[in-house]
Each structure stands twice: as structure tokens, then as C-alpha cells.
Image (cartoon, rainbow, N blue to C red):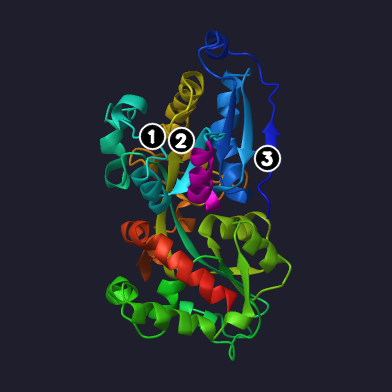
Amino acid sequence: MKPTKILLATTALVAATGAANADGHMANEMTLVSWGGAYQASQVKAYVEPYLAMHPEVKVIWDESSAEATAKMRAMTEAGNVTWDLVDATASDAMRMCDEGLIEELDHDAVLAAAPDGTSASEDFGDLIVSDCFVPQIVYSTTFGYRTDMVGDTAPTSVCAIFDTDAYPGKRALQKRPIDNMEWALFCDGVAKDDIYDTLSTDEGVAQALAKLDTIKSDVVWWTAGAETPQLLADGEVVFGSTFNGRLFSAIAEQDQPIGMLWDMQSYDLDGWVVPAGLSEDRKARVMDFLKFATDTQRLADQAKFISYGPARASSAPLVGMHATLGIDMAPHMPTDPANATNVHVYDYEWWADNRDDLDAKFQAWLAK
């Protein structure tokens, strides 16, 4: 799927804060990079629309290329033509880009808003600041949805149901990358959770994971954009599909699709903003102004009104309440809710930051067979 760019033009009322910045010191156009679908829509509602209401002189262009962020940042940097201003990235991708000098190191307390009680940003985000270049937004998980009308009388309760094509015939949707797929494959081939990354660090472990995936390879529809699995499930083209938990929430709660959630071995991860290195001063000034606004306590809590991802700030969590339009309590739909977290896979973003290029090459070679 080619990245689509959606130009957001606003006719919002002029606010004093907008007029004050219309002096040429900040660029009046930003290209934001995200993932499309329900997640990007939640960012528009929680961050961008309120910001544009204060800054009607600003235009925001969306590019839905976050899944390819590292490769595209490498290419743009090498070409000396970085067209992105702010990029939504996973923690492991942020760590890779930071190590390669593709994105800016940030003084979090200097550039981000403190909590309402004065707690510094670094303390409020805490351990979720996993890189000097990374500003966390959400805690989310990659997990499975399934068609409730295609699984017979016995709904799946284990992630290993995806490998059981006898009990659950039909296509499965999996993300076209090794992350999560390799871990689920090893777990369902008998490897203990605590041993997954040690096993995956060996050639034999990689071969074991790929051999397990071989058992369903002919039944897999591979996806690259988070919006694809909900659509495949809604169309009845797959019986199971992995995707981000917020996308499944949107399909189930907002669209009333016949989809169930399979929380078993959901894979916890972090997502946040990174700033490309080498932006001109006027572009960087605009980005930093937006970044401070978009990651304050209220804005992160507001995002949880639109999608079931946990806000990364400790001060935001108590402000999470009802869905903006459905009026349902959002807390039970979060991946961190105790009822959903009985068997969680804690994704090791540091391991993947160190091993991603090697595993990507091996995974793509396996796909091509």
C-alpha cells in the first residue's frame, strides 16, 4: 500500500496564540508520519485538531509510512532531503534510528511540558523513555482478532489456535515482519516465554520459528498497514488476524463487526514521536511547539477517548474515562487491564533494535521461498 498523504486544512477560529507565532520564526507546514486508520484518527482528534484551532496558519500533511520509518529515514538522510518533520515510531525503531544518528537527541525536561502538579516530564514518563531520542505516547499491544461467526462453537482462548488449521480452517492475517511472529511461533512450538529471546539468538532457534510458521505459510495473508487486518476480518477474508489492539477495539466497539479479541500472548510495546535530525530552524521550532502540546498530560489522556491505548504519562492515567462518542468506560478495553493481561508477551525492544536487520533479512528470504 502506497503511503497516502492527507492534507489537513483548517478553518478554525483564529486564536491569539496562533497570531503570535505568525512572524516567520516557525514553519507553517508540518509533515507528520504515522500509521493510518483508527490510530491516526485518534491523533488527529486528540492532538492535531486542537493545535490547528490555535494555529490556523499551519497546514499538516500526513504520511502513513511509520511501518517503514527506519528505511525511509536512512534513504532521505543519505539523499540529503528529509521531508518529514515528526515521525511516530515504535520504541525499537526509535532506538535504531537514534543509534544511527537519523533522529535528534532530546532533553525531555527542557522540551516537554511538566505534569499539572509540576512533576518533570522525565519523571512522569519514567522508564518508558527508552531512548534519548524518543518521546513516548502510548502503551499498546499487538494481538489477534477473530471472526466470531467463523470459529464454530468453540471460541479460541490460546494464541496457538492460529497454528491449528484443523480446528480453525481459513486464512490468517500476519504482519509482514519477523517481530511477534517469531515469538508466537516459538511459544507455540513449546519454548517457554522466558527462553524465547535466548532461543531466537541462535541459528537453530530462528530455524525452529520459521519451521513453525511454515506450517501455516500457505494460509497467511501478509499485511503492512494496521488498518488492513480489521478490514480483512470485516470482509470475512480471514478467520484470525494480528493487529494493534486499538484497531480491533474500533472494529468491535465502534463498527459493531462480528469480531472477538484474543488477548492471549498479546505483545506489549511502546509507540512515540521522534524528530528527524537536521531540520531547518523554522521547521524544528514548529515541531517542538507542536510536540510539547501534543504530549502534555491532557492530550495523552484525550487520545484514550478515541482508541484503547494506554497513555504513556503517569499523570494521564487517572484522566482516562469514557469513550468520546460511545460513552463506554475505556479502562476495561486497555491492554493493561488485569482481565486482559493474564498471559502477556513482553516484547523486548532492545533485543530487536540489536537484531532487527539480521532477522529481517532471514525473514524476507524465508518469505521468498
Q: Position of residue 329 (x, y in %)?
A: 50, 51
Q: Position of residue 237 (x, y in %)?
A: 71, 73
Q: Cβ–Cβ below 8 Å for labels 1 and 2?
A: yes
Is any part of residue 304 visible from this angle? no
Q: Which residue is mark 1?
A: 104
Return the disc, 3 or 1, that comes first in the chain's sequence: 3
Toward the viewer: 70 or 233? Answer: 70
Is any part of residue 226 visible from this angle? yes
Q: Amino acid at mark 3?
A: Lys
Alpha-carbon distance for marks 1 and 2? 6 Å
Return the disc, 1 or 2, that comes first in the chain's sequence: 1
Q: Position of residue 213 (x, y in %)?
A: 50, 80
Q: Which residue is mark 2?
A: 276
- Indicate the quadrant containing the N terminus: top left, top right, bottom left or bottom right: bottom right
Toward the viewer: 145 or 301? Answer: 145
Chain part drawn in magenta: 67-79
Q: Amino acid at mark 2?
A: Pro
Majority secondary structure in the magenta region: helix
Horizontal relation, residue 84 to residue 152: left or right = left
Return the disc, 3 or 2, that comes first in the chain's sequence: 3
Q: Is residue 266 magenta?
A: no
Alpha-carbon distance for marks 3 and 1? 24 Å
Local secondary structure at mark 3: strand
Horizontal relation, residue 120 to residue 241: left or right = left
Q: Which residue is mark 3?
A: 5
Q: Residue at x 34, y 35 (%)?
A: 105
